[in-house]
Structure formats: structure tokens, C-alpha cells
Amino acid sequence: MDTSIVAVAYLVAAVLFIAGLAGLSGQETARRGNALGMAGMAIALIATLLHPDVSPEHVGIIVAVALAGGALGAVLAVRVEMTAMPELVALLHSFVGLSAVLVGFASALQAGHHDGFAAVVHRGEVFIDVVIGAVTFTGSIVAFLKLRGSISGAALIVPGRHAVNLGVGAVTLGLMATYAGYDQLGALLAATALAAAFGVVLVHAIGGADMPVAVSLLNSYSGWTAAAAGFVLGNDLLIITGALVGSSGAILSYIMCKAMNRSIWNVVFGEYGATAGGASALDPALAAAVARGVNTASIDEAAQILRSATSVIVVPGYGMAVAQAQGPVRELAELLEAQGATVRYAIHPVAGRLPGHMNVLLAEANVPYDTVLEMDDINGDFPHTDAVLVLGANDIVNPAALDDPKSPLYGMPTLEVHKARAVFVVKRSMAAGYAGVDNPLYYKDNTMMVFGDARKVVEQIVKAMAHG
Amino acid sequence: MAEFVDHLTVFVLATCVGWYVVWKVTPALHTPLMSATNAISGIIAVGAIATGGMAGASDTSRWIALAALFLAMINVVGGFWVTQRMLHMFRKKG
């Protein structure tokens, strides 16, 4: 196939990828968008196989390896539980990272296409590709292990790490000059090892509930590393696709940070998860409330109040996913709807361990997506809502973020559930949330705590309501 | 150098396109967005094929590239497939 036909095929693929992402702007167009992306990928892969530089004698092995990888991907996609989506996404990021490292090395070992300064530029590109790829690879592996619970989710901070980071940066620049300028493969290998270690330290320092940001950030890196591989190979399709993915991850990181009222710098290099938790001077009003204790509700009391409710909002958090409570929640919603109540769901941007994770879990439990609302669309409705059910969420419903300038959460946009007539908080114990801050919501007069596992509690309420 | 600048132009423009397109993605579909970007970043398979299929490549270089291809194809198929699986779960009321 002529190289200009391949170039046209790449152009078509790039346009299809852009159209595919644009399709995700709405539920109605999303599936078609994904199909466009698949078509783009198929066109790009076939065109590459027919490229004149790909010698026909190797096509057999290439197709065999591609099919083997694809088969493994299919197995992962079919078997993954929706609660484990964050792990799968992190794992796939690590593959992009490692793949970029390998492509960089394969290209480095094929020197000879460039002369003089062009060769220096090429080696510089290889270096950047390999370094970003290595950080993406090990960072994503650590994120995967943290999300899976194989290693502790707590933030692990290396002492003096700001100085260490600066040192790593300086050494990396030196190695880049050595490799690009003098073609010393050893420098590239050393930089790869250093970047791999840096990826581990970087993600280790990010606490469990900041994982949505870490995963978004690694999503962005996986894009930039693909783009860097595109520079190495002089392939515009890789550059375009990598740039699309890079921007996407950057936007998601930005949205997550804004939803926590923190800067990306604070999430990545701050010591939030590690140092917060000291109960500083408690607000006198809150102290009095804590001394009074919380209201609790039994299953029957909760069922009785829900029975007379005409408007109910469910606020799911990570705890709902852990307890696998989404199915029973839908049953409860159906009972409430049968008695004439409206039931809706309020989603905070950082609920869960992945952007949009709650929406997928609810969709899996057959909750219609038009009853699932974003924070800004539903926050004004709490004052005229009869009952709110908070399931395994904590910091995202903390009213201190609104009215207590001394709270570490102050300024974070939250779901204003305390404005509803009655609030049920389903929680295992009185333990503080991730931020380590006490939640004044629990001590409000209109709040009732229902202690227990989210799934069991909801199942029991369903039973109590069905029998009442 | 001119070649580098050409690629840089493409890169910057594509970043801008991505920025405007992705802001329009509905937050409800942010997880499918991530898995879809997982899938398309598997485009690195194209680079792996080009590197591994080159006539004059050494065996070492070729096998490294084929390993990259294997990983990238996990992303391509796994990413698109799981995205489709998720998108089929979203249903409207009634």
C-alpha cells in the first residue's frame, strides 16, 4: 500500500477518535461514539500492517501477537466486576506506560535513520518517551495495588521528599544530556530505573480517597507517553491520539481537584492524607453537640419515616460500592416509587474511587440514568426533600465545608443534605471520614444515624417497608 | 528540526481539540471516558507494528516491539469492550 494511502487512513482514524470522544457528551450518542473509536482503531491497525516498511515476512507473527494481546484484553473486559473498574483502568494505564518504554527502547536499538542534530533530537524524544512511560508504568502498578487493597491505601511519605524530587529531576536532566548528546545507552537505562522508582514514590504518597485524582493523572500521563512515542516514530496519529488522551486525563484531574477544593499540587505533593486527623480545637457548638450524642434510628423507625416521604434523595459514596448495596437500593427505590414518592440520586464528583464510578454502579443495578443527578443540578432541591439516605459517604456531605472556616474541608463544594427534612446516615461506626474531620451533620436534629453494613441495612429497610 | 516542529504543531493543535471535546463529556460518563481513552491510547500498537515489522530490525529490537504490541492490544480490545459493556448498562426510565 502506498504511504500516502496509509497517511490518509491515519487521518481518518484520528477524526474517528475525536468523533468517538465527542459522542460521550450524551447518553444517546455514547454507544455510537465508542463504535466510531473502534472503527478508527481497526482502520489504523490494518493500514499499518499494509505499510510498505512493514516487511510481509513479519506480518504473521505480528498478527499472532496482536490477537493474543487482544484475547487477553477481551477476557479482562468480560470478567471485570464493575466495582473493580478503577483497578482495571489503572492496570490498562500501566500497559500503555510499559508499551511506550518498550517502543522507545526498540527504536533506540535501531539507530541509524537520523544523522547529526536530527539524531540528537531523536534520542531526546526517545528519552522523554521512556521516562514518562516508566513513571506511568510503575505509578499505575502502585495505584492498581492500592485500589485492590494489596498494599495499604494510606499515603506513604518519604522523608525530605521535596529535596529528593528536585534531585531526581536534576539527575534526569543530566542523563538526558548524556544520552541525547553522546548516545550512551547506559544513561537511558539509568534514567528508566530512576523514573520507575519515582513513579512508585509519587503514587505511594497519594492517600486512598485521593485515588480518583491519581488515576486521572495517570490517565493523562498515559496519553502524554503515547504522544512522546509518536514523536519518536514520527507518527502523527500517535501524537494526536496521545494528545487527546493527555488532555482528557488533565481535565478529569482538574475536575476532581476542584471538587475537593484543592490544587493538583496539594494532592500530589501535599501531605493531606498523612497529616490530617488531629482533632484540633473543636467548635464550642459542635463540642456541645458531640457531648449530647447523635440521634439513632432503628430499621422500623427509618422505614416508617420513609413510608410517609414523597421525595427521597439517595447519596451514595464509596461505602455503597464496598458493601455492594446498589441492588437493594434500587429495590428500596422501587418500593418508594410504588407509594408515589420520587426517588433521585445525588452524585458528588469525587464519590467513589474513579470519576463517574457511582454512575456506572447505579446503571449496573438498573437505576435509570435520568434519576441520577450531578451535584450542581440537585443541590438546590434538598430544602424541599422529605428524606435523604446517605450511604457510605462522609466528607462529601460535611456541612462544615460550608460554614466552618476552621475546618480543613472549608470551601469544598458538598451536597447540602442537612437542609432536607430528615437525613438518614447509614454508617458502620462513628469513625471520621478520610479527611479525619468530625462531621457536624451527624449531630444535627434532623439527622438519624442507622449503624450497620450499608447492604444489610437497606435490605432490612426494604423488608420492613414491604411488610408494613 | 523542521520535522520536529511539524510534529509539535500537530501535538499542540490536537491537545486543544482534546481540551474542548472532553469538557463536553457528561460527568455521568467519566468512567467510560477513561476506559475509552485506555482503548485509544492502545494506538501505540501502530508504533509497535511499525518498529517490529521493519525489514532491517535486529531480533532484540523486534521482540521488544512485539512485547509492546501485545500490551497495547490488551488495551485496545479490553478498553473498547469494557466501555461498550458499561454503556449498555445505562438505561433511561420507562
Image (tube, coloured by chain):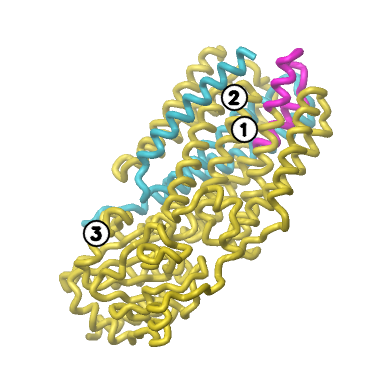
Chain colours: A yellow, B cyan
Q: Residue at x 64, y 14 (%)?
A: B1
Asked if labels 2 and 1 share a chain, the reply is: yes
Q: Nearer the viewer, residue A125 or A465?
A: A125
Q: Residue at x 55, y 55 (%)?
A: A87
Instruction: Give residue A198's position: percent from left, percent from top.
Output: 70, 47
**Image quadrant where residue A404 sits:** bottom left
Which residue is identified by label 3? A380
Instruction: Give residue A140's position: percent from left, percent from top.
Output: 62, 49
Q: Are marks 2 and 1 in contact (CB under 8 Å)?
A: yes
Chain of residue at mark 2: A
The answer to whether residue A132 is above or below residue A45 is below
Residue A120 forms part of the magenta stretch: yes
What range of the chain is rendered magenta?
A99-125
Which residue is identified by label 2? A49
Q: Secondary structure at mark 2?
A: helix
Q: Secondary structure at mark 1?
A: helix
